[in-house]
Amino acid sequence: RLCVLSSALLSHGTPLSTHKRTSRPSSHSTNTHTTAMDGLGDMDLSSLMGGAPPGVEFSDDDIEYEDMEVGDSKDVSVSQDGGCLKKVLVKGTGEARPVKGAEVTVHYTGTLLDGTKFDSSVDRGDYFKFKLGVGRVIKGWDQGVASMKKGEKAILTCTSEYAYGKNGSPPTIPPDATLLFEVELFSWKSDNDLFDDTGCVRVKTLKKSTAYGFPNEIDQVTVSYAVTAPDSDVAGAGDEIVAPTTSTFSVKDAPFLGLGAVLKKMKEGESVRYKMRNVPGGVQYLEGVPAGKTTAPPQVADVVVTLNKHCSVTSICDGRGTKMTTVDGEGWDRPNDGATCVVSIAVAGKETLLPVESTFITGNEALCEAVEECVMLMKAGETAQAVVPRECAGEFGADAKDGNVTLTITLVSFDKEKEVYTMTNAERVTFGEDTKVMGNDAYKAGNLTLASKKYEKALRFVEHDQSFSDDEKRETKKIKLSLYLNSAAVALKLQAWKDTVESSNKALDIDRQSDKALFRRAQAKVELEEFDDAKKDVRAILEMDNAHREARTLHARIKKLEQVQMKKDAKTFGGMFSKLGGLYSEAETGRVGENGEGFDAKKASGDDEDLGDDEKMPPVDIGNGFVMEEVTGDPVDGEGKD
């Protein structure tokens, strides 16, 4: 709560009882309203921050606060220099205290040593909230409130060094003033309530960690934990429910729900005491904890958890296998496609099949799928255990007796292939051409998947050539056209019709008269049953080369497929229109019957007449005054484009 004091008003003798203040805490707000005040003024604590020394952040985990009885007085400053003395008026409940970063809710009354009151949230009837331990209030408050429990009321005596310093905050706080604050702590909301349901609350960090990363569901962890019944006075001092236990498991397979939940928020080497409970109508965090010495499984418990080891696990082989890091590597870098890697590989139950140091290049499928995928996820010096299906393990799974193979892989070292953005234009052209040749070799060998990957990679070198010279662009144009055509050919063989059309379109953007692009797009359009588009592409080829054998063969195939489709349509429409009945005589129409009888596919296709490639087949009367006819050519004036 920020109280804005107008120096102009004060200089004209305006009484403090009518000074303006904001209705909510804010260190820079200028929205004000007038409030009647008692004594020397209804001045919010945060309004005086401008005169206070900068708050000193501290770690509450480094402090052990003693329990105090009513009437006790003790120095609760971090430095133990007498800067913040606390006298307990009402003892708090529970064991927990607010920690750094918690948003606390309090009432307070501030006075000078002579009893003059300068501020009171109690008089305003408005709780005061602030974030603890981050310098948003005076240092005496950050450190004094951190020592309090829920429901506790105490007097904090703060020296000027812990309040507003040598200058004070005129005219309300004199220079070098020691201040008294009667503070009552009602509640706090903390990051320590891990899931905001009071089911898992971090009571104390027993050992900190500087490790990186948190476990996920499938990671393997080695954990020490113990569960005790909560004591009314001292957390963790109750009856034993689960004796100290150390075990290794996947996080998702934790012995009880709360343990798995908190592990995902811990780091390797960290040790924490938690208060866990089964939330009524909510998550049952203690589900799975045995009864111990009690007559029933606990509803509330103190749980101490130490994460001894965290082994990161990643899904590989399309989710059918896993890679688990057993020895972490160095740095952050990992191999890229084309990196030269030195690895050591061993198969469980066998001697090493490869030399201690075997060298291969990633992206060429020189080793099996499992090894390549695993290595691409590793750092230099890392050792990982891969459990993969036998069919993904290549030669390493040849003698496997069951469905899975366990490999131990060490990435001894690697040299990354030069990244595109670091290459000169000439290097990009060379790499693009060389990678295209690798794709061609894979295509000839029947390895269509590898060929497709190589073509995609080659395009990354040359696709964006805006900065190239004219001569270089002529080179990249040739390479790109070849890559798009080859990609379309691979997609055709893989029956990826839409990919075929996309690659063919890109090739035609470069060369509108490419018969290969037109033909491959026509083939894909036929499979997609887009016969009109397919015929347009075939006719475009025949206009350039009327003797194009493959195009003429495809054109004939399209006509046969259309005949089949037209017969299906005739059956459908004939059945529909026959239900209209009686509008025309059968003799007048020569219509197709309800089941397609009377349909002459040869006549409908035009095969019984000497038609050129561009001539239309005759109309087909489908009954009751309706005629179906072939439409050729492009729509006129936009007609039919919808």
Image: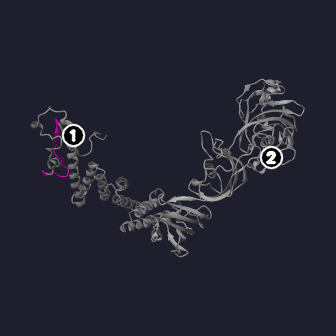
Q: Which quarter of the figure has residue 37?
A: top right
Q: Quadrant of the N terminus?
A: top right
- Residue that appears at 13% across and 44% down: 598
- Residue 618 falls inside the magenta stretch: yes
Task: Measuring from the top left, give residue 505's x and y in whole percent.
Answer: 36, 53
Secondary element at tag 1: helix
In front here: 282 or 392? 282
Amino acid type at image mark 1:
Phe
Disc 1: CA contacts within 10 A as few (<14), some (14-19) or many (>=20): many
Mark 1 lies on residue: 573
Please give the label number shown on residue 65. Answer: 2
- Vertical arrangement, residue 474 with respect to residue 539, above or below: below
Amino acid type at image mark 2:
Tyr
Whether residue 304 can be seen here: no
Secondary element at tag 2: loop
Which color scheme does this rendered protein use?
one colour
Task: Measuring from the top left, give residue 322's x and y in whole percent.
Answer: 52, 60
Please give the label number shown on residue 503. Answer: none
- Residues at marks 1 and 2 touching, judged by CB atoms closer than 8 Å: no
